[in-house]
Every structure is written in C-alpha cells, then in structure tokens.
C-alpha cells in the first residue's frame, strides 16, 4: 500500500515538472516570435513580402507563337511559359515586376529556371532543343546575379523596391538546314524562380 502511494506521488511530481517545462518552452518560443516580428516603432508590423506582378503581353520576334499565358504560380515563381517556333531567329519574351513590399531589405540568393521540354517527334525535338536558349534578366538585359539587392518599401536612402525583369526564349538563327524540324514542335514546361533572403545588417 505504501509503495503504491509512493508511485502515485512520484507520478504527480513528474507530471508537474513536465507542465512547468512545457510552459517555459512555450514562453521561450513566444518571446522569440515577438523579437522577430515586433512593432517597428510607428505602430506597423515588420514583414517579409517579395512578389512578382504585372506580367506583360508577349513581345514576339519573327513567327513565334505563344501557346500559354504565363502566370504567377507563387510569390516569386512564373509558370506556364510556352511557345511554338516556326523559323530560326524566332523569339518571345515577357516582362514583369518584382517588388519588395516588406520592411526588410532582400538579396537574391539563387535563380532557378527549369529546362524546357518539347512536344513533337523525337528527332524534331532533339534538333530544336539543341538550339533553344532562354534567359531571365533585368529588363535592360543585365544579368540577375546572387547578391543583387531589392530594397524594402520603407528604405528612402539606398534605392527603390521595384525592378522590372524579363523572361526570354530564343530559337537560334545559326542552324544547319538538316536540323530544321519537319513539323511543328511545342516548347513548354519552363518555370522561373528567384529566391531571396534577408540582408544581414551589420
């Protein structure tokens, strides 16, 4: 009987210690969140928000034909970029904005563009894909590189928070006649992502 009571007392002590430990862990987590997202001093909340917006109509050179309408799949991902090329030298491009609507300065950490796929005969697709190139750049053609800064919406000293980007798909005009496709092919499955990270102040 005495042993049973000791076991119950020990069990109650363990339960109380567990509750206290959980309370401290919760308080610690809440404190951390308060530090990360505290008021900025003017009553507004600090936030992280980088977004793509304002996709243009296609800019077409030659006989390229847009087959889909690019759309914003997630905050900084453009998807559904596809076209049919009819002759060497054809190209198609779209411009769009990237905007920092948050309160933290951001920096490009990586750029990812999926390799295009082709719908058509195997031989035609092989020949076309050998001569298709694509580029994700700033609107003026300058390369986007890791480390580029996109300043916050409330930064009034170092620069603006909005840049215009361009996604281009080009069918090279330097092609042997033997490599020209015999039938139409569709270039598809192209998706562009730019990843950003917070600029560490220091």
Image (cartoon, rainbow, N blue to C red):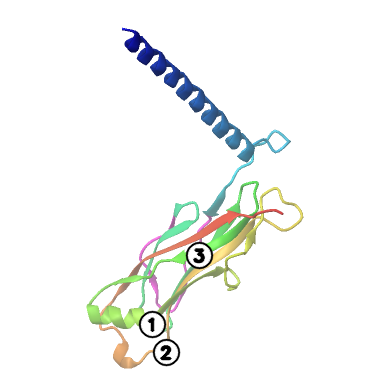
Q: Is residue 118 left or right of residue 54?
A: left
**Residue behind mark 3:** 111
Q: CA distance from mark 1 to mark 2?
A: 8 Å
Q: Are marks 2 and 3 in contact (CB under 8 Å)?
A: no
Residue lying at the far top in this picture: please name it.
Answer: 1
Name the image quarter holding the C terminus.
Answer: bottom right
Which residue is found at the position 53% from the left and 67% from the top?
166
For marks 3 and 1, give the one nearer the viewer: 3
State whether residue 114 appears in this view.
yes
**Residue behind mark 1:** 131
Which residue is found at the position 45% from the left and 18% from the top?
13
Q: Which residues are magenta?
A: 53-72
Quadrant position of residue 24? top right
Q: Residues within 10 Å of mark 3 (few under 14, many from 20)?
A: some
Residue 54 lies in magenta, yes or no? yes
Percent coordinates x, y for residue 162 in the rendering: 63, 57
Tell me: residue 125, above or below residue 76.
below
């Amino acid at each position: 009987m005495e042993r049973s009571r000791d076991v119950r007392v020990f069990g109650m002590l363990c339960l109380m210690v567990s509750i206290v430990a959980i309370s401290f862990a919760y308080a610690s987590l809440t404190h951390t969140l308060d530090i990360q997202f505290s008021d900025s001093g003017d009553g507004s909340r600090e936030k992280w928000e980088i977004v793509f917006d304002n996709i243009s109509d296609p800019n077409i050179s030659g006989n390229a034909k847009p087959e889909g309408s690019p759309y914003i799949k997630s905050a900084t991902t453009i998807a559904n970029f596809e076209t049919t090329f009819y002759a060497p030298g054809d190209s198609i491009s779209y411009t769009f904005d990237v905007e920092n609507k948050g309160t933290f300065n951001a920096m490009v950490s990586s750029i990812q563009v999926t390799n295009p796929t082709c719908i058509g005969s195997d031989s035609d697709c092989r020949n076309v894909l050998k001569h298709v190139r694509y580029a994700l750049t700033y609107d003026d053609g300058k390369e986007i590189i890791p480390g580029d800064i996109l300043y916050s919406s409330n930064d009034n000293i170092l620069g603006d928070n909005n840049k215009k980007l361009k996604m281009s798909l080009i069918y090279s005009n330097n092609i042997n006649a033997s490599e020209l496709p015999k039938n139409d092919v569709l270039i598809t499955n192209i998706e562009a992502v730019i990843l950003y990270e917070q600029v560490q102040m220091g």
